[in-house]
């Protein structure tokens, strides 16, 4: 029987990499889904106020926001949700398979709550004024609880993707040990805080359209209080969240994230605080365009860097610190009867054990050395690094444009074979495959230098023509 290190082909996306495909879709989905969950609690709290204080005029705002959710969150969310499934399935089939084997009933429960949520938002919107207020309030609270439950269940899975937090799950394989991991409660608190803040910001888009000034003032200030509470809760949860991360994630945060990430996120945090304080102080000055702009700032300058950072600090793993992003199983999991692929890779290499290795590359010759090196590099590295001189963590830039094959090989031996770089995956390639990868990476640097030289020559020619 053929011994293999994986059962699926690798999905290589030039320049941006598969991680950015997932990240772009995921960021849009998180914006839509977190707005929905936050809005559900806004509805429940605001309607409770309306019933207790006999203010039916507040229900018109809930109706408007509910219709907006149906178009924004549930249509966009329903498109990007399957988009995430498609992207992660082709990018890391083994990672998704591992999550399904652990959480199949959790996902099933999430879909039950999601069904209740979708039915609930339709019923909530279309039954306003058609049933008695107390019955409608019960419906709204049911919608809010079901909506938050979907987040709770998904957060357990996302937190496990970071790490289980202890050795119990590796030995038991228990869903509960996987779900209630070290990262779970802090992560849930962080996302809950964000859902309040984003719902408050998006809610301003609708609050600015209310005709009754008294209602507009009351709702805008309610949104501001909700947003400020979310920001302060988020800061507390963030400090807790940091303490629950594995060591490799902390090292990546300190040394590998782009320098603009932290100041950008702090800038967005400050802008949101200013926005909510200002709208609480001068609610009638809130304009719809300003609320739209604030939402765009949160999505582009806040949510995208945050989601990118969370995905980056989890590397090189995609699930439970036992599945690498490149589908390789990196450690034994007795509780799931899973064994590491690393001994097999060290003994026989990638070309001999990968089931989708082209037949013509299984025997390396002088004519196909670069193609063989390219195949190994893309299988092992392309989930985290682009092979071009741009995009996601380009290999050429990581190696500082080196064309020295011996130096590149020495780095591979230290970083990969021996695991000397703590945030890099330990992949003990055989010596001859390290040589092939080193030759291929050196050729990428030479190509980049050639392109740069040609571009420089063209610029000189254009300049000379201009002088003439």
Image (cartoon, helix red, strand yellow):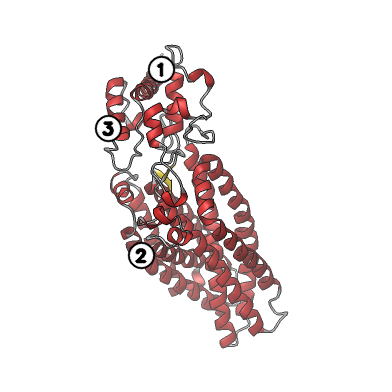
Q: Residues within 10 Å of mark 3 (few under 14, many from 20)?
A: some
365 w.r.t. 160: above or below = above
Residue 326: in sight, yes or no? yes
Q: Nearer the viewer, residue 127 or 381?
A: 381
Residue 362 vs residue 127: left or right? Answer: left
Q: Quadrant of the C terminus?
A: top left
Q: Secondary structure at mark 1?
A: helix
Q: Secondary structure at mark 3?
A: helix
Q: Which mark is residue 154?
A: none
Q: Secondary structure at mark 2?
A: helix
Residue 332: x %, y % from top left: 40, 45
In this view, the mark in front (1 or 2): 2
Q: Nearer the viewer, residue 128 or 434?
A: 434
Identify the residue at horizontal 46%, vertical 55% (top origin).
158
Q: CA distance from mark 3 to mark 1?
A: 34 Å
Q: Which mark is residue 454?
A: 1
Residue holding disc 3? 414
Residue holding disc 2? 235
Q: Residue furthest front?
A: 1
Write down the quadrant of residue 326 in the picture: top left
Number of callouts in the render?
3
Residue 404 vs residue 336: left or right? Answer: left
Q: Residues within 10 Å of mark 1 (few under 14, many from 20)?
A: few
Write down the quadrant of residue 56 in the picture: bottom right
Q: Are marks 3 and 1 in contact (CB under 8 Å)?
A: no
Q: Earlier in the sequence, mark 3 or mark 1?
A: 3
């Amino acid at each position: 029987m053929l011994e293999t290190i994986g059962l699926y082909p690798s999905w290589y996306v030039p320049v941006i990499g598969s991680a950015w495909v997932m990240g772009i879709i995921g960021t849009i989905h998180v914006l839509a889904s977190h707005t929905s969950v936050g809005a559900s609690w806004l509805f429940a709290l605001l309607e409770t106020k309306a019933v207790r204080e006999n203010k039916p005029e507040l229900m018109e705002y809930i109706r408007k926001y509910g219709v907006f959710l149906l178009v924004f969150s549930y249509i966009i969310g329903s498109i990007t949700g399957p988009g995430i499934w498609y992207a992660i399935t082709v990018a890391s089939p083994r990672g998704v398979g591992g999550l399904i084997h652990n959480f199949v009933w959790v996902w099933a429960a999430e879909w039950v709550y999601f069904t209740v949520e979708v039915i609930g938002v339709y019923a909530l919107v279309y039954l306003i004024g058609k049933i008695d207020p107390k019955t409608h309030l019960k419906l709204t609270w049911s919608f809010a609880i079901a909506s938050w439950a979907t987040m709770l269940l998904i957060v357990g899975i996302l937190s496990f993707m970071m790490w289980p937090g202890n050795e119990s799950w590796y030995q038991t394989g228990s869903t509960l040990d996987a779900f209630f991991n070290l990262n779970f409660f802090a992560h849930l608190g962080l996302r809950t805080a964000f859902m309040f803040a984003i719902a408050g910001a998006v809610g301003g888009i609708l609050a600015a359209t209310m005709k009754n000034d008294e209602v507009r003032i009351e709702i805008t200030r309610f949104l501001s209080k909700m947003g400020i509470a979310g920001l302060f809760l988020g800061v507390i949860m963030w400090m807790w969240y940091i303490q629950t991360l594995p060591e490799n994630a902390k090292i990546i945060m300190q040394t590998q994230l782009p320098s603009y990430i932290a100041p950008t996120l702090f800038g967005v945090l400050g802008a949101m605080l200013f926005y909510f304080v200002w709208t609480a102080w001068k609610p009638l000055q809130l304009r719809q365009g300003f609320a739209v702009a604030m939402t765009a700032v949160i999505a582009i300058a806040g949510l995208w860097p945050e989601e990118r950072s969370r995905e980056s600090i989890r590397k090189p793993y995609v699930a439970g610190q036992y599945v690498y992003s490149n589908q390789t199983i990196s450690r034994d999991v007795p509780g799931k009867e899973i064994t590491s692929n690393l001994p097999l890779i060290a003994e026989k290499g990638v070309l001999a054990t990968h089931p989708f290795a082209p037949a013509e590359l299984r025997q390396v010759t002088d004519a196909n050395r670069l193609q063989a090196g390219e195949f190994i590099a893309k299988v092992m590295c392309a989930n985290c690094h682009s092979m071009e001189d741009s995009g996601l963590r380009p290999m050429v830039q990581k190696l500082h444009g080196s064309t020295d094959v011996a130096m590149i090989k020495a780095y591979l031996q230290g970083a990969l074979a021996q695991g000397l770089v703590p945030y890099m995956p330990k992949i003990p390639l055989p010596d001859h495959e390290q040589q092939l990868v080193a030759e291929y990476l050196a050729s990428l640097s030479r190509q980049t230098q050639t392109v740069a030289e040609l571009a420089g020559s063209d610029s000189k020619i254009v300049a000379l023509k201009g002088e003439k």
